[in-house]
Image (spheres, grey):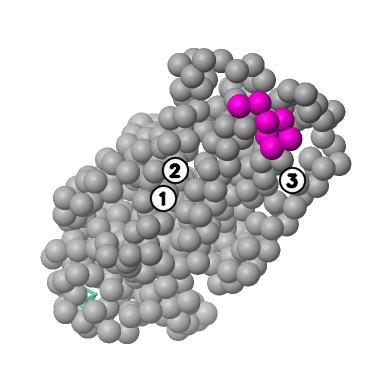
Amino acid sequence: MAGQFNPDLHEDLRRFGARDLDMCMNCGTCTSICPMSEDAGGGFPRRVIRLVQTGRQKRLEASLDPWLCYYCGDCTLNCPRDANPAEVMMASRRYLTARYDFTGLASLFYRSVWAELAAIGLVGLLVTGLFVFLHGPVVLNHVALNTFAPVKWVERGDWIMAAILSFFLLAGAARMAWWTLGGPAMRRISPAIYLRQVPAFFVQLFSQNRWRRCGTHRSVVRWMKHLLLVSGYLSMLTLVLILLRWFQTDHVYPFYYPQRLWGYYATAALLYPTGDFIVSRFRRKEPIHMFSEASDWIFLIMLFLTALTGILVNVFRVNGFPLATYVVYIIHLSIAVPMLVVEVPFSKWSHIMYRPLSIYLAGVKQAAAEGKLLAVRDAEPVAG
Ligand code: SF4
Ligand code: SF4
């Protein structure tokens, strides 16, 4: 790379999925049609395409624009050159995810599906091995899951896993903030500005409310499915990280007891949207699901299998099949743990952090620019 320019940036983005980028002639149709463009300070998404075409790597890394696109596909449907701007934005998000990750693993996984599958397999085998060699007594005359897998040990394992993935996610978030707020310039921003934007992070994390404004009515349906998925995911995290002793019990409570109802809700909220998204990716009719990279499939399939094996554990447990319960429990954790440890910090899952963070950082940039705390070059464009 020479200075601020990287002549290979264009080629790099192609490897992350922006295969039709060459076709763009910068007509601006995508910008005029994009429902999110105004929010992003105008010029969006064409601005991102220009940055890639002109090899401006540093400006791309300092941009929040790719995270403000919710892939409604309107731009792609109206592009006169079939340059597929929506997929350029998606590829930019993959590229940025790889750049935020200081370990280089995200970049490796995006470039090599075999490396990603090998990492998932290794972590899965490690979990299986731990259970094979360290499990508790195998009770076969009734289901005793907490004897086979003592809940306090599983709980500690969950916390270690949460600490690992939080560390890598937060490290990525720190790099994103450093680059997008202009590095040393971010020290000039007062703590009050940072604090005032915190609610925006959580509103976006829990509601993704900007998605409703993106694209045709189908995006509203998609937003609702995604919201359901996030609620299932956050429910499951709460149950296994905070409430595991209450949730993983050998006593079979009636189905209307809260831990069972909450578990059923979380499972259904994971299974339905992931199953729907998998079918949609096969059909390739909706713009968002027309182009699938390996990482898109792995992400969805692992989430689906985690929910499916979770419900199977419950079916065997409630119906009194001890051996099947223990075996499926090991399979369940051998899928769930690599999904969390490998996929959350180093793959598409990381958007659970970067999307709301982009809204937070856009708010900080805006407030800092208004207070003339960032140089114009640092602050422009305000949301990207
Ligand atoms: S991506 Fe398509 S619509 Fe957008 S500027 Fe390029 S050619 Fe025009
Ligand atoms: S996919 Fe939708 S939100 Fe994203 S750039 Fe295109 S029109 Fe805008």
Look at the image and tell me whether residue 198 can be seen. Answer: yes
Inter-mark Cα distance, 3 to 1 = 26 Å
Tell me, yes or no, whether the two marked residues, 3 and 1, touch with CB atoms within 8 Å: no
Q: Earlier in the sequence, mark 3 or mark 1?
A: 3
User: Label 1, on which residue?
Assistant: 275
Task: Decide: is 160 above or below 8.
Answer: above
Q: Is residue 322 magenta?
A: yes
Front disc: 3 or 2: 2
Q: Splitting the image into four quadrants, where does ligand 1 fall? A: bottom left
SS under mark 3: helix
What residue lies at 61% left-to-right and 59% top-to-bottom? 102
- Amino acid carrying label 1: it is Gly
The residue lying toward the viewer, choosing from 367 and 110, is 110
| In this picture, residue 372 sits left or right of residue 267 | left
User: Label 2, on which residue?
Assistant: 271
Q: Position of residue 116 (x, y in %)?
A: 62, 63
Instruction: Please report the bounds of the magenta region as a residue range.
Output: 319-326
Look at the image and tell me whether residue 201 can be seen. Answer: no
Task: Decide: is 221 above or below 54.
Answer: above
Tell me, yes or no, whether the two marked residues, 2 and 1, touch with CB atoms within 8 Å: yes
Q: Position of residue 335 (x, y in %)?
A: 63, 48
The numbered dot on residue 127 is 3
Task: Decide: is 105 above or below 171.
Answer: below
Asked whether mark 3 lies closer than 8 Å to ligand 2, one says no
What residue lies at 32% left-to-right and 84% top-to-bottom? 22
The residue lying toward the viewer, choosing from 117 and 182, is 117
Q: Position of residue 227 (x, y in %)?
A: 34, 40
